[in-house]
């Protein structure tokens, strides 16, 4: 388990997540407006309670009265009016694979500023966008086991759970155990909202990304040792 005593920031990652949600909602809103028989619609027509709030959501602007972009009050309106399948689709989309490389890149760029994180991939020198994307393609996309685990773990994360893998010693042998944990900091819902998103991204970084990086580093070390012995 990674023990971090500081409070890291994940500005790039949060901004990306907000912007992706804004694009999904904007697309659905345009479809909603088209169904109004070409009558010119406004944000106030869609959400008369607070047209400025809805406008900010469409822009991905989480300032002012919506610090987490999507408020609990507007969520059922988005769900019922815009043809989303469920709340999870509003926040995280239908297919996380579409944006997973961008997410990984932003997250590592945020994490690299903290030695407690970056030491887990020090051999790879992931100090810019291009190097991180190359790493993602070579060690995650090109490795089916790594890719599927990352996808599965991230999907679990968006549904408010993660697997906290720990090692226990039994008769001198260390074995992993997995414990299912709820990560919602307020309400134990079936989907992961944007409330306290930076804290939740910290869990994503420490419980999912760092173990993945450790696994990749270990695999690379073992491969190097095998080549040296040949």
Image (spheres, rainbow, N blue to C red):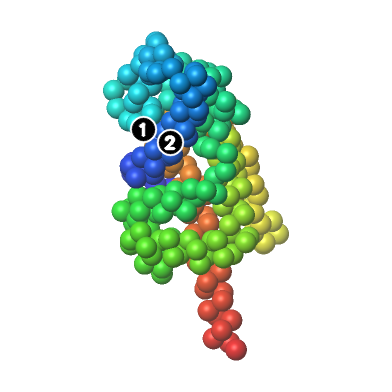
Q: Viewer-proximal residue, 107 or 49?
A: 49
Dot in front, 2 or 1 = 2
* 44 in relation to 139, above or below: above
- Element at label 2: helix
Q: Residue at x 60, y 89 (%)?
A: 230
Characterize the local packing of mark 1: few (<14), some (14-19) or many (20 or more) Cα atoms within 10 angstroms.
many
Q: Which mark is residue 209?
A: none
Q: Residue furthest right?
A: 171
x 41%, y 69%: residue: 123
The answer to whether residue 174 is above or below residue 5 is below
Helix, strand or loop for disc 1: loop
Residue 61: where, in percent of width, then height? 32, 30
- Give x and y (percent) for residue 31: 50, 28
Kindly identify which residue carries mark 2: 23
Mark 2 packing: few (<14 Cα in 10 Å), some, or many (20+)? some
**Which residue is under mark 1?**
60
Locate residue 4 relative to residue 183 in the image: left or right. left
Q: Position of residue 4 (x, y in %)?
A: 39, 47
The answer to whether marks 2 and 1 mark residues whose Cβ atoms lie closer than 8 Å is yes
Q: Residue at x 52, y 48 (%)?
A: 98
The residue depicted at 36 percent of the width and 67 percent of the height is: 125
Mark found first going from the N terminus, 2 or 1: 2
């Amino acid at each position: 388990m990674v023990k971090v005593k500081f409070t890291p920031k994940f500005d790039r990652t949060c901004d990306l997540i907000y912007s992706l949600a804004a694009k999904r909602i904007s697309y659905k809103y345009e479809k909603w407006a088209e169904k109004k028989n070409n009558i010119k619609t406004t944000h106030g027509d869609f959400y008369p309670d607070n047209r400025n709030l809805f406008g900010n959501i469409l822009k991905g602007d989480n300032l002012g009265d919506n610090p987490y972009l999507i408020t609990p009050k507007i969520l059922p309106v988005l769900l019922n009016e815009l043809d989303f399948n469920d709340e999870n689709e509003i926040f995280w989309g239908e297919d996380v694979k579409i944006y997973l490389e961008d997410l990984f890149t932003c997250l590592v760029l945020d994490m690299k500023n903290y030695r407690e994180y970056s030491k887990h991939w020090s051999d790879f020198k992931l100090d810019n966008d291009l190097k991180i994307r190359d790493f993602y393609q070579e060690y995650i996309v090109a490795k089916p086991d790594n890719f599927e685990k990352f996808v599965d773990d991230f999907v679990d994360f968006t549904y408010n759970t993660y697997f906290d893998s720990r090692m226990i010693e039994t008769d001198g042998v260390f074995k992993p155990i997995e414990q299912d944990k709820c990560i919602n900091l307020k309400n134990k819902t079936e989907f992961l909202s944007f409330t306290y998103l930076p804290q939740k991204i910290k869990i994503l970084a420490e419980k999912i990304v760092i173990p993945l990086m450790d696994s990749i580093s270990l695999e690379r070390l073992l491969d190097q040792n095998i080549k040296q012995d040949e």
